[in-house]
């Protein structure tokens, strides 16, 4: 009873042919290994996340306002200037005054 795989061709490979096939296989690039990392869990409370988001929005609004004031006069009538002006004119301070509920009967 023969052992091992059946030959792919008309005859079985010699040791030299088998070694050449092995070396050729080793030289090919290995398939990329996919490493999946878990995202860290955000452990902040909802009110803290709200305060952080509002602070980020206010910081971005201040950056856009600085960008708008730094624009040269030749770019004042462009769509970029209009968008910057709309962002600078948003009333975001009302968001900072809101204190979200803590939930489940807590005050």
Image: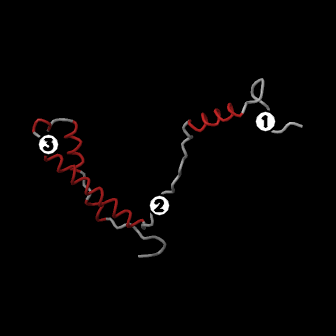
Query: Residue placed at 78% from the left, 23% from the top?
Result: 10
Q: CA distance from mark 1 to mark 2?
A: 48 Å
- The numbered dot on residue 5 is 1
Q: Callout 3: helix, strand or loop?
A: loop
Q: Callout 1: helix, strand or loop?
A: loop
Mark 3 and mark 1 lie on one chain; the one further toward the N terminus is 1
**Mark 3 or 1, which is nearer the eye?**
1
Q: Position of residue 71 (x, y in %)?
A: 14, 42
- The numbered dot on residue 71 is 3
Q: CA distance from mark 3 to mark 2?
A: 39 Å
- Residue 19 vs 93, above or below: the answer is above
Residue furthest to the top in view is 10
Q: Quadrant of residue 7?
A: top right
Residue furthest to the right in view is 1
Left or right of residue 1: residue 57:
left
Q: Which residue is mark 2?
A: 40
**In contact (CB < 8 Å): disc 3 and disc 1:** no
Q: Position of residue 8 (x, y in %)?
A: 75, 28
Left or right of residue 17: residue 72:
left
Query: Residue placed at 26% from the left, 53% from the top?
Result: 60
Query: Residue placed at 37% from the left, 62% from the top?
Result: 50
């Amino acid at each position: 009873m023969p052992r091992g795989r059946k030959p792919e061709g008309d005859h079985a490979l010699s040791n030299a042919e088998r070694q050449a096939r092995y070396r050729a296989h080793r030289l090919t690039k290995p398939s990329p290994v996919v490493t999946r990392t878990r995202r860290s869990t955000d452990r902040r409370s909802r009110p803290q996340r709200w305060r952080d988001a509002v602070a980020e929005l206010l910081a971005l609004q201040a950056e856009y306002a600085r960008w708008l004031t730094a624009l040269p006069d030749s770019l004042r009538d462009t769509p970029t200037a209009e968008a910057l002006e709309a962002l600078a004119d948003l009333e975001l301070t009302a968001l900072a005054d809101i204190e979200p509920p803590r939930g489940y009967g807590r005050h």
